[in-house]
Amino acid sequence: MVSSKRGKAKKAMEAHVLAERVCQGDLSAFQGLVDQFKKKVYFLAYDVVGDHHEAEDVSQEVFIKVYRSLGSFRRDAKMSSWIYQITVNSAIDLLRKRKAKPSVTLENFDHIELQDAPRGAATAAVDPESSAEAALLQGRIEEALHVLTPRERAVFAMRHYNDFQISEIADVLEVSSGTVKSLLFRALQKLRRKLAFYRGSGSWEVNDE
Amino acid sequence: MNECQRCRQVFADALYGSLDDSRRRSFEAHLGQCDICREEYAGLRATLQDMKKRERTEPDPAFWEGYWERLGSRMHREKILYQPRPSGPRRPSFDWLRFRMPRWAFQAGAAVLLVAVGIFIGRMWLLPPSAGVQTAVHTRGATAPSSLELASRTQNYVERSQLVLMAIVNFDRETDDPYTLDLPYKQQLSRELVQEAGWLKQGLADARQRRLQELVADLEAVLLQIANLETPGDMFAIELVQTGVQSRGLFLKMHLAEVNRPWDDLGTRTETPPKTDKTKIF
């Protein structure tokens, strides 16, 4: 626990040093900054927008915004929170722009699943029946996530798929912990109703662990 | 409030492990007695477990290896990498040369700038005397505005206010994110406009432009509300502003002002220069 805190503090320090160097025109420092955050930014974006290609687009936009605004970044602020805030806002913007586009449905899920993963993401060949079941389960979960508003989805993804603590989410979104909890709770209620609908229709049974 | 309602209020805390000991004990005691709450809570926990079964496909290592290259080329394409690389063993920095302007571009820019400064000086100092426009009949010493200045500043005030109010009124708190509203900027603009309003109201009162004066005052009241909003996410305050704009019929008034252009009368009311004089200067 203590070592993890120390590790975080060290990384934060490194990020600030890199930012300082970027402001002096050092592009390799910017590359270092990108390397430090690219995975977290990318996966956070992916969990909110639900598409690998769009997630890469969002993550690139995030780093471009970071590069442009580093000069005005307050040195006493937490850089990771700032970067994740840009990520969440960019991803939410994209979801809103995409409103008109049809959401993922079971009819097109298989097609998307095959095309979606970038450049050869591993999909192990296993027993076709269990693989179909797993695909169905994943499809239901993705579809359930679509009932959430962009903000609820972002908060849920941060907490459950990216290991953010509630206080960290509150920092990133600049809201109180109570607001984060109520967003999470509202999201959970919606998800429950959606999953109950699948169970009710008998088309999906999830075995609780 | 009955026990069940109290119990449901702490569901979120219980699910996310932030119940203190005493609250946990009473929560668990209630769940032990109440089937409905127990079922509800178990359902939420099960949903959480189901949602944790989500798997995401990991991009392969080549994706990460090429990440910087793709980002870099996008930044080049979008001309974002304008800064020179101070040092670096990899290759000579041509970024700076690539985006360096040719000399003629600077010369053209300087010429445009000179013309702009000339026009600005002309408008500021040459136009009033040559056009014969003096301060309005109701001048109050040296600070009283000229009619033309009052007209142009009033028009400018109304147009800028309209922009701020449009953004606030069109903001949908159900679907829009408060951060996209860029409230700090709108507040800054509102503060500037509120400062401007005092001067305008005085000038318009002197010029006996009662309606314009009222419009400026109405706008000032709403802009003051915007300038004093405390937090970007204060939905209630934003809703109050939206209601204020609607109840005062501000958009209708601004629209009427746009159509009738009362500031034009203001500019021509006293010793107005013939239009031909104005066109000669520009």
Image: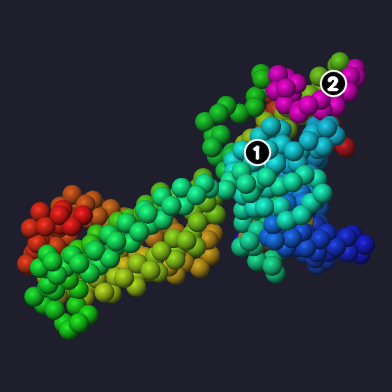
Residue at the (66%, 20%) spot, across then down: A108
Residue at the (39%, 60%) spot, across then down: B241
Q: CA distance from mark 1 to mark 2?
A: 37 Å
Name the element at disc 2: helix
Measured along the vertical axis of the image, is residue B91 above or below residue A201?
below
Which one is in front in this view, the residue at disc 1 or the one at disc 2?
1
Name which residue type carries label 1.
Arg
Within 10 Å of disc 2 (Cα), the crowding (few <14, some 14-19, many 20+) is some
> Which residue is most to the top?
A128
Residue at the (65%, 58%) spot, across then down: A70
- Residue B59 at least partly seen: yes
**A176 in magenta:** no
Residues behind callouts 1 and 2 on a single chain: no
Q: Nearer the viewer, residue B235 or B183?
A: B183
Q: Position of residue B272 (x, y in %)?
A: 9, 63
Name the element at disc 1: helix
Residues in magenta, as a range: A109-127
**Mark 1 chain:** B
> Which residue is most to the bottom?
B141
Residue at the (41%, 64%) spot, across then down: B189
Q: Taking A61 as reference, is B274 left or right?
A: left
Q: Which residue is mark 2?
A: A131
Measured along the vertical axis of the image, is residue B255 above or below residue A146?
below
Where's the C terminus of chain B, which quadrant?
Answer: bottom left
Colouring method of the image: rainbow
- Residue A50 at least partly seen: no
Res A143 label: none
Q: Quadrant of residue A201?
A: top right
Q: Nearer the viewer, residue B160 or B241?
A: B160
Within 10 Å of disc 1 (Cα), the crowding (few <14, some 14-19, many 20+) is some
Q: Which residue is mark 1?
A: B74
